[in-house]
Amino acid sequence: MSGSTIFARIVAGEIPADIVYQDERVTAFRDISPQAPVHILVIPNREIPTLADVGEEDEALLGHMLVTASRVAAEQGLAEEGYRTIINCRDHGGQEVYHLHLHLLGGKPLGRMLPGAGE
Ligand code: AMP
């Protein structure tokens, strides 16, 4: 088995996923439990546990993740009306899978960023 998380196994092709884009640096696939009509995860192929673990050497990779999210969003027809990207980090961020991933969500108005915030 390659990798320590389920996402590493998706990158390696060891378990199935609905992959919408993949290159030598990143993989984008549909979330198995979608929270919006379009819910795609963009991950680095290399295992980085959390956003708190990145360094300057990861700047290009992180930029590539964002550019990939933008391109995938456009391909999914989300660009005109917009969408949301989220990176959850560690415990307080609600991160469940410890392989860095960017959520791309869209396809309907998503409402407030944090329900109940500011009330
Ligand atoms: P987070 O809470 O930010 O760590 O998000 C983890 C996300 O991974 C959740 O939205 C899950 O639904 C999703 N997920 C977990 N296992 C899989 C899988 N095998 N394929 C696709 N998405 C998954």
Image: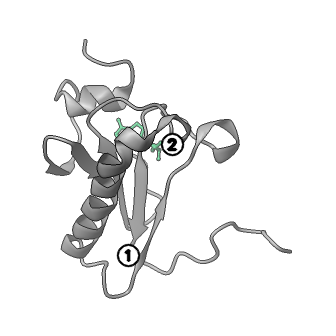
**What residue is disc 2 on?**
51
Are the residues tagged 2 and 1 within 8 Å (C-beta)? Answer: no
Q: Nearer the viewer, residue 20 or 71?
A: 71
Q: What residue appears at the point 31 percent right and 78 percent down from the top-left corner?
A: 78
Mark 2 Cβ and ligand 1 under 8 Å apart: no
Amino acid bearing label 1 = Gly
Regarding residue 105, the answer to whether it shows in the image is: yes
Q: Does the image show residue 42?
A: no
Q: Residue 92 carries which label?
A: none
Q: Which amino acid is tagged 2?
A: Leu
Residue ranking furthest to the left: 23
In the rendered image, the vertical position of residue 55 relative to residue 66, given as above or below? above
Residue at the right extreme, as displayed: 119
Q: In which quarter of the image is residue 100?
A: top left
Q: Mark 1 points at which residue?
A: 107
The CA span between labels 2 and 1 is: 26 Å
Outermost residue, front direction? 56
Q: Is residue 61 above or below residue 96?
A: below
The count of marks equals 2
Residue 34 percent coordinates (x, y): 42, 55
Q: Position of residue 92 (x, y in %)?
A: 70, 42
Quadrant placement of the C terminus: bottom right
Point out the tag, 2 or 1, that comes first from the N-terminus. 2
Is 83 rendered above or below residue 52?
A: below
Q: Residue furthest top?
A: 1
* Residue name at image x 68 percent, y 66 percent: 114
Looking at the rendering, the quadrant in which ligand 1 lies is: top left
